[in-house]
Amino acid sequence: MPDPHPNLPQRTLGRDIGLGHRDHPLLGHVVLDTETNRTGILRALCPELPDGGAPDLREQMMAWLAPLNGGREWTTSPAAIRDQPLAARILGRLR
C-alpha cells in the first residue's frame, strides 16, 4: 500500500497503525517535550492540519502528549520528544 503521507519526513514516521496514526517506540512512555519543557505520556503520532485545518496548508505529523497527573493533552513536533526513563521509574513508584 502506498504511503498516505508522502510529503512528511520519513524519519518521524513509524509503521502505519491505522487512521493515519503511526507507530513510535515511545508510545505509552513518559517523554520530555523539548519545545515546552513539559513531561507527559506519548499518546499518539498522527497527521494534523495546522491553523485549524486551513485547506491550503500541508499536513504535518504531530505528537500528542497527556500530562502525567491528568489534564488537557497538547501537541508537539515528533522531533521534540525525548525519552524520560528516570521520570517513568519515579512515577511507577508513586502509583
Image (cartoon, grey):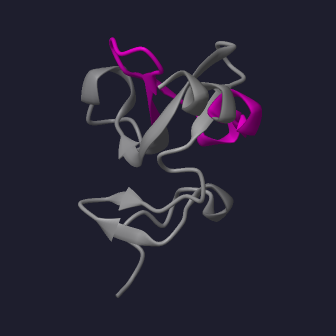
Q: Which residue is drawn at 33% across and 11% down?
A: 71
Residue placed at 23% from the left, 60% from the top?
19
Residue name at image x 60 percent, y 41 percent? 78
Which quarter of the figure is the N terminus placed in? bottom left
Residue 57 x, y percent position in the rendering: 39, 36
Q: Nearer the viewer, residue 9 or 33?
A: 33
Q: In this view, does 36 lie above or below 81?
A: above
Query: Looking at the picture, how far across and down is residue 18, in whole percent?
Result: 27, 66
Residue 7 forms part of the magenta stretch: no
Q: Which residue lies furthest to the bottom in this view?
A: 1
Range of the magenta residues?
Answer: 64-88
Between 65 and 61, the one lying in front of the other is 65
- Vertical order, 35 against 21 (above or below): above
20 sits to left or right of 92: left
Nearer to the camera, 65 or 8: 65
Please identify the quarter of the rendering in which residue 83 is found.
Answer: top right
Compared across the picture, whether 84 is left or right of 15 comes to: right
Tell whether position 66 is magenta: yes
To which quarter of the image does residue 48 belong? top left
x and y percent of residue 8 in the render? Answer: 54, 56
Q: Position of residue 32 (x, y in %)?
A: 67, 27
Compared to residue 74, the image places residue 41 above or below, namely below
Q: Residue at x 56, y 33 (%)?
A: 92
